[in-house]
Image (cartoon, rainbow, N blue to C red):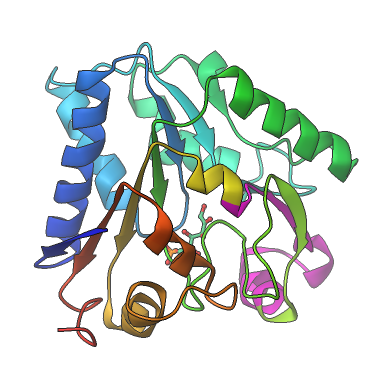
Amino acid sequence: MRIIRAKDYKDMSRKAANIISAQVLIKPDCVLGLATGSTPIGAYQQLIEWYQKGDLDFSEVTTVNLDEYKGLPRDNEQSYYYFMHENLFRHVNIDLNRTYLPDGMEPDSEKACGDYNRIIAQVGGIDLQLLGLGHNGHIGFNEPGPSFETETHCVDLTAQTIEANKRFFDSIDEVPKQAYTMGIKTIMQAKKVLLVVSGKDKAEAVKNSFFGPVTPQVQASILQLHSDVTVVADEDALSLVH
Ligand code: F6R
């Protein structure tokens, strides 16, 4: 595991974007595994800037996202489909037919997850998987638990997550109660993993994930066993480990 120390969020975003753009330059038809959440937004902005300058070409890139809420239509502003379009896809020359997320509108969980596993296999697996890190060490929607889930599966969101998401919806009934997420095996099968993390509030998670024992209670800790992981963390996120 390589840990790259960044000064701050901006520096972290630039360093992460450099690694992603190197992947696209070396293999223009690569498969990028992408994440939502606030942490990767700066890296996406940097990639858009380089694309606009003519330094990057996404025309042959395929993307597979980590996760999606179950039951949210694509045009809902809280859906991860919407997020990816707003924060990356609509600003670059990516072929939308080659961008994949789990189908949140498929009510049959088994079908949605099976279909997504097949898509990941059909595109030939993931060259570079981008990840953020949850406060409890989650990656994707893989939450602390007794074991590591393998492939794409449906998770029940915790009462805490539902409560926290309430503010984005008109009523609590509209807040998604479940999500589809790639599993740990899928993430571990990516050829390279790039995890971005920023802020003092993530320092404990960084310590537990990368400087503690490998345990499903801290799902990101499994990344210690991957042969090609780069963590780009800012000084605040590293404040408990150096
Ligand atoms: C996003 C995802 C989540 C986030 C994590 C960190 O697709 O799967 O695991 O990466 O919750 O979120 P932020 O970056 O908002 O702190």
The foreground one among 138 and 39 is 138
Of the pair 230 and 70, the residue shown nearer to us: 230
What residue lies at 32% left-to-right and 18% top-to-bottom? 58
Please name the residue shown 32% across and 78% down the image. 211
Say which quarter of the image contains residue 198. Answer: bottom left
Q: Nearer the viewer, residue 237 or 164?
A: 237
Furthest residue in direction right, as rendered: 108
Q: Quadrant of the N terminus?
A: bottom left
Q: Quadrant of the C terminus?
A: bottom left
Q: Is residue 158 visible?
A: yes
Q: Is 118 on the left or on the right of 106, as rendered? A: left
In the rendered image, residue 153 lying in the magenta stretch gets the answer no
Magenta range is 161-184
Decide if residue 213 is on the left or right side of residue 149: left
- Above or below — where is 147 with respect to 4? below
The spot of residue 132 in percent (x, y) is 41, 59
Q: Position of residue 136 (x, y in %)?
A: 51, 78
Does 211 sit above or below residue 173? below
Residue 145 appears at what percent x and percent y? Answer: 68, 75
**Residue occupying the point 72% across, 75% down:** 158
Percent position of residue 107, x then y:
89, 42
Residue at point 56%, 14% (across, down): 97
6 with respect to 165 (left or right): left
